[in-house]
Image (cartoon, grey):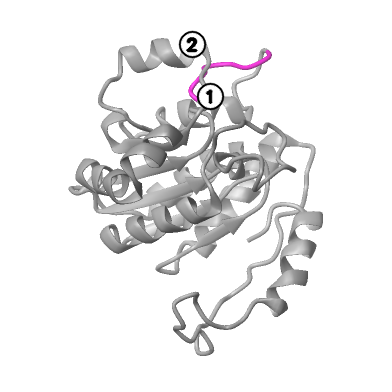
Amino acid sequence: MKATGHEATKIREVTPHIAPATEEGHRLAGLRIRDYGDVAIDLNWERYFGTVQAQATQALQHPLAVFLGGNHSVAVLLIEAFNERITGQSGVIHIDAHLDLVDTFQGHRWPPACTARRVLEQSNVYPKHLTFIGIHSFMDEELTFLETHSEIGVHLAHDVACLGVVAVAKDVHMQLQDMDAAYVTLDIDALDLAYAPGTGTPEAGGLSTRELLELLWGIFAEIHNICYYVGE
């Protein structure tokens, strides 16, 4: 499912040029993928949010659903749809440069800076179920929030570089090992701006593409019931 026409067009344009095999040499020729199409842009936000959630619920009938493109705040709706389909407890793995934990930003409750805060307000998500990876930018309000919610997992980009991908992936698994499912949400600005210079909020000192790929491999290897969202 693609959130905007421009992004969807580019994604579909490059897909035929990707070799049908993994970098380890495993063939993907028999892999079946269903494209549910785009979510049309709608300036009526209440109606638009409802449409996104309804279409996400449809896609989530499959064991692995991937949502591509769009402002990262759309993850709030996707995670809510995900939790409606999950029986039991679910965790959220948030890969990002930022914590997105402020309550309001520029007078609004729904910007990307508030994504994780809105997710924590959902009935099936608790601070102990939330873990961040790749963080390398903070706002003062977020640091204050973390001081009273120490059960949230925070793995800095610095941790990935200094402790290693394996150690971080292991910590994430330990935190979420009792979860029945996990949702992975990825904001592209988790990558260093050398790898993703076009993002709207670039931050120096982020992950490399190699580190990100290895992190995803490590997470998928340990936590099997995963929904995956790629953010802005």
* Visible residue check, residue 124: no
The image quadrant where one finds the N terminus is bottom right
Comparing 127 with 199, the one in front is 199
Q: Which residues are magenta?
A: 101-106
Front disc: 2 or 1: 1
Residue at the location (69% across, 66% down)? 37
- Numbered circles on residues, count: 2
Residue 78 is situated, as x and y percent measured from the top left of the image, at: 52, 47
Is residue 8 shown left or right of residue 150?
Answer: right
Element type where label 1 sits in the image: loop
**Relative to 191, is 20 above or below?**
below
Tag 2: amino acid? Glu
Residue at the location (69% across, 41% down)? 47
Is residue 59 shown left or right of residue 45?
Answer: left
**Relative to 150, is 16 above or below?**
below
**Relative to 21, is 79 above or below?**
above
Element type where label 2 sits in the image: helix
Residue 190 falls in image quadrant: top right
Comparing 164 with 144, the one in front is 164
Reply yes or no: does residue 82 show up in magenta.
no
Residue 42 falls in image quadrant: top right
Which mark is on residue 141?
Answer: 2
The image quadrant where one finds the C terminus is top right
Residue 136 is situated, as x and y percent measured from the top left of the image, at: 50, 28
Comparing 27 with 6, the one in front is 27
* Visible residue check, residue 202: yes
Is residue 200 shown left or right of residue 136?
Answer: right
Tag 1: amino acid? Ser
Residue occupied by mark 1: 137
Residue at the location (51% across, 19% down)? 138
Residue 197 falls in image quadrant: top right
